[in-house]
Amino acid sequence: MKQDLVLDVGEEVCWEGRPAPRCYTFRHWKHSIFGFIFLAICTYWQVLGFSLSDEYEIPWLVWLPLPFVFLGLYFSIGHLLQARLEWNRVYYAITDRRLLSQRGLWRLHTDEMKLEEVTYFSLHHQGEELGTLRVYQGKEKQLVLHCLEHPRKATDLLEKAIEPVTTPVGASPEPDTKNQAEEANS
């Protein structure tokens, strides 16, 4: 795991992982489709700005579409490059007490969730042995572990953490051996 991850005294790491690089990089590929269309429109606007600026001698027409061209570049390929650079600093861990997620491109950011506070989780399969795990604490807070390879190892640990807390609906606790059996006979 990452060297600067701080664990509590006596806390042990049960599982650690990183996202699959290609999956993590291209997880928002649909944004690129929008980005290329937006970039094409803004590039046409930029070319039109050059021609109008020359014809009417208004220099600000060249500068007006420039921020939108840069925004189109970011949406088309910039966010993919940013995700690939961020991948080097993404780590996930499940300890015997907490679920940890560490990520960040410029500044390292660590999210944590105590295992006893996990209410449920969902696994979105992205391949045979690839999936994104969303872990929920109540209805408000969630922690997302993107593009895990072999996510079943992590879900098994989360199931063990959730299992003792929940009891099935309609099931009654098992009766005390002698006391409740004697009460039933009388």
Image (tube, rainbow, N blue to C red):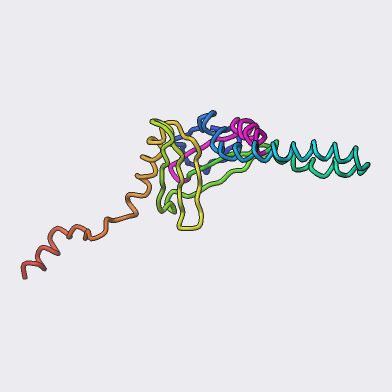
Question: What's the residue at 45%, 42% (across, down)?
Answer: 133
Residue 37 in the figure: left or right of residue 125: right
The percent position of residue 141, horizontal first and vertical second, equals: 51, 54
Give the quadrant of residue 175: bottom left
Question: What's the residue at 88%, 44% (across, down)?
Answer: 60
Residue 148 within the segment the image draws in magenta: no
Q: Nearer the viewer, residue 103 or 2?
A: 103
The percent position of residue 17, horizontal first and vertical second, equals: 49, 33
Q: Identify whether 175 is placed above or below 84.
A: below
Give the quadrant of residue 73: top right
Question: What's the residue at 75%, 37% (across, down)?
Answer: 44
The percent position of residue 22, horizontal first and vertical second, equals: 53, 28
Q: Identify whether 99 is placed above or below 4.
A: below
The percent position of residue 104, horizontal first and vertical second, equals: 63, 39
Residue 86 in the figure: left or right of residue 43: left
Residue bounds of the magenta highlight: 75-98
Outermost front residue: 55
